Amino acid sequence: MLFPDLYPDNPRRAARHDELSFLVSRQIIEIRDAQLALRPYVDPAVAQHARKLIARSNVPADQVEAFVEATQVKAALQAMEEGNAQQHTTTVPHHPAAGDMGIERDWLIRVATAFRSSDFIKDAIAQAETLGAVRA
């Protein structure tokens, strides 16, 4: 799951209320807040390398950007763990949901599904590292 990886010390952080829609909304907000915190560690070149790798794979077209976002999150988490802030000005990867929590939820489910595809993510990050996109 994506959420526990963003908050490893407290994976149940969003559980503040019994109402399911509230919990889902809180979790979405917490995930996006965590991505904002990762912004100094996001390297846009990782997305470029992920897209190149995806182009040679059998990832369905409607899943490409979810895989790209998942790869960027994983690479940023690694960079943060290693203390390697990037020297790039970048925006946080984000699927345009226009404030619709249902669309945002569905999108983050796709990102989480891609995030769990560790072999693909590892390969994309390794390719970016090999080509110098991610500082080791």
Image: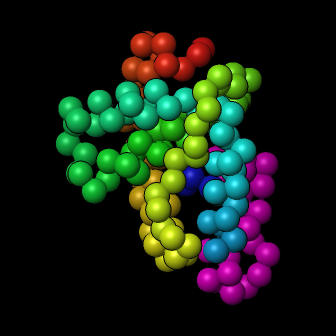
Vertical order, 99 against 69 (above or below): below
Task: Point out residue 63 in the picture as x, y percentages from the top left corner.
Answer: 32, 53
The answer to whether any part of residue 109 appears in the image is no
As rendered, which of 23 and 48 lies closer to the eye? Answer: 48
Q: Is residue 55 left or right of residue 31?
A: left
Left or right of residue 39, residue 49 in this image: left
Image quadrant in which the N terminus is located: bottom right
Quadrant hosting residue 110: bottom left
Residue at the (69%, 71%) spot, across then down: 26
The image's colour scheme reads rainbow
Query: Which SS does the magenta portion mostly show?
Result: loop
Residue extent of the magenta highlight: 4-24
Residue found 32% across the figure and 47% down from its top: 64
On the picture, is 2 further left or further right than 71? right
Q: Nearer the viewer, residue 10 or 105?
A: 105
Q: Is residue 5 magenta?
A: yes
Residue 67 versus residue 32 in the image, above or below:
above
Question: Splitting the image into 4 quarters, where does residue 54 fall?
Answer: top left
Residue in view at x 51 percent, y 53 percent = 94
Q: Is residue 102 above or below residue 32?
A: below
Q: Is residue 91 magenta?
A: no
Q: Is residue 108 visible?
A: yes
The x, y position of residue 42, in whole percent, is 59, 34
